[in-house]
Structure formats: structure tokens, C-alpha cells
């Protein structure tokens, strides 16, 4: 009776679990979801809005993203998107097909030592000559490295220590 007189609601009987059954507690401020599930829901909604506006821009043929344009098309894109996606997805397919021809080049198989062909995986050592070697062939004298370390070090020292000469006579 006291709660009715003061207008206050009684406290909830217990903590509310997230409606996504993730195991965390939710709150009424986040629609009975935990903070992570609520953040994911908002992120998905924003991505859906961006995708709908970009598809509508492609359909209209305008490349400039005016702030007014997505607001106007927001009510129309629900009806137009499923029909236009089929015609829009066809032109990018040849472009992605040309990219697929470049993808098999990097996937050339397991990493192997250049000298003994032993599989090295993540423990391989890359030499300055550009080749990959195992632990026993990683040093330059073990794999007959063509890289000229002496000249490279001389050039590095010359760059780090420029020659500074003062003039013998002060100019007046």
C-alpha cells in the first residue's frame, strides 16, 4: 500500500538475463540485452542503413554522397533493393573474376628452405638476398649468399655520418 501512495514502483524481483541468452545480465535501458548484444544490434542497424543508401546511390547512378539523398530514399529502398540487387551484382562479377586470377599467385604452398627444400613454416629466416632458409642455412656463408654486406654497410655508415668540412678561411 505504501508504494501506491508514493507512486514508486517496487524494485525488480531479480536480475534480468539478456534476451539473447548469452549468459550476461540485461537492463531495461538496453531493451533487456547485455551491453555487448545491444552494441552489436546497433552496429548491424547502422550497417544496414549504409548498405541500403549505397545501393540506392548505385541504382540512381549518382557517385556523390549527398546527405539529403539517403534521407529521401530511406522509405523507398525496402521495395527497390531486392529487385535491383540482381542487376547490380552482375557487373562487379567480371571485376572480381579478374581479381581471382591474381589470388592463386600468393598461395604457392608451404614455405620451404631455398637450399635444402625443408619445410620451415613460421620459423623460416628471410635473408637480405630475398630467399627463405631453415635454421641451418640461415647464415650467409651456409647458403652462398650473393648479397654484398660490406658495400651495404659502408653505404649505411656513409649516410649516417656525413662529412662536415669547414672552410679554411673565413669569408669577409
Image: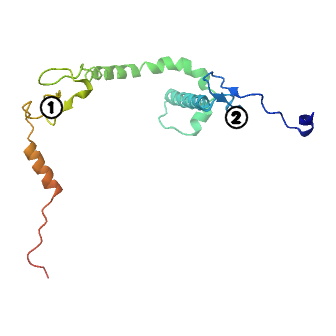
Could you classify mark 1 by the number of other residues whose Cα lies within 10 Å: few (under 14), some (14-19), or many (20 or more)? Answer: some
* Total labels drawn: 2
Q: Residue at x 10, y 50 (%)?
A: 154
Label 1 element class: loop
Q: Residue at x 20, y 31 (%)?
A: 125
Could you classify mark 2 by the number of other residues whose Cα lies within 10 Å: few (under 14), some (14-19), or many (20 or more)? Answer: few
Does label 2 or label 1 sit earlier along the sequence?
2
Coloured how? rainbow
Q: Quadrant of residue 142?
A: top left
Q: Which residue is mark 1?
A: 138
Left or right? Give the position of 10 relative to 62.
Answer: right
User: Where the N terminus falls, by quadrant?
Assistant: top right
Q: Residue at x 9, y 38 (%)?
A: 147
Q: Residue at x 16, y 54 (%)?
A: 159
Q: Nearer the viewer, mark 2 or mark 1?
A: 1
Left or right? Give the position of 13 relative to 22.
Answer: right
Left or right? Give the position of 42 relative to 130.
Answer: right
Query: Which of 8 and 151 lies nearest the eye of the viewer?
Result: 8
User: Where is 15 relative to 165, above or below?
Assistant: above
Query: Which of 38 and 22 lies nearest the eye of the viewer?
Result: 22
Q: Quadrant of residue 78?
A: top right
Query: Picture coordinates of residue 60 (x, y %)?
Result: 52, 29
User: Where is 91 relative to 70, above or below?
Assistant: above
Query: Picture coordinates of residue 87 (x, y %)?
Result: 47, 18
Query: Picture coordinates of residue 116 (x, y %)?
Result: 12, 21
Q: CA distance from mark 2 to mark 1?
A: 60 Å
User: Where the C terminus falls, by quadrant?
Assistant: bottom left
Label 2 element class: helix
Residue 29, labelled with which disc? 2
Amino acid at each position: 500500500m505504501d508504494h501506491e501512495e508514493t507512486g514508486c514502483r517496487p524494485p525488480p524481483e531479480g536480475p534480468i538475463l539478456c534476451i539473447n541468452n548469452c549468459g550476461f545480465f540485461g537492463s531495461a535501458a538496453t531493451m533487456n540485452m547485455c551491453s555487448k548484444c545491444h552494441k552489436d544490434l546497433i552496429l548491424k542497424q547502422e550497417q544496414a542503413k549504409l548498405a541500403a543508401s549505397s545501393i540506392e546511390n548505385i541504382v540512381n547512378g549518382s557517385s556523390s554522397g549527398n546527405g539529403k539523398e539517403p534521407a529521401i530514399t530511406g522509405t523507398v529502398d525496402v521495395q527497390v533493393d531486392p529487385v535491383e540487387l540482381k542487376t547490380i551484382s552482375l557487373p562487379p562479377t567480371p571485376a572480381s573474376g579478374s581479381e581471382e586470377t591474381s589470388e592463386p599467385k600468393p598461395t604457392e604452398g608451404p614455405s620451404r628452405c631455398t637450399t635444402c627444400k625443408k619445410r620451415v613454416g613460421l620459423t623460416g629466416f628471410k635473408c637480405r638476398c630475398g630467399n627463405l632458409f631453415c635454421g641451418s642455412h640461415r647464415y650467409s656463408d651456409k647458403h652462398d649468399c650473393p648479397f654484398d654486406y660490406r658495400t651495404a654497410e659502408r653505404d649505411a655508415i656513409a649516410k649516417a655520418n656525413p662529412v662536415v668540412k669547414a672552410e679554411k678561411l673565413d669569408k669577409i
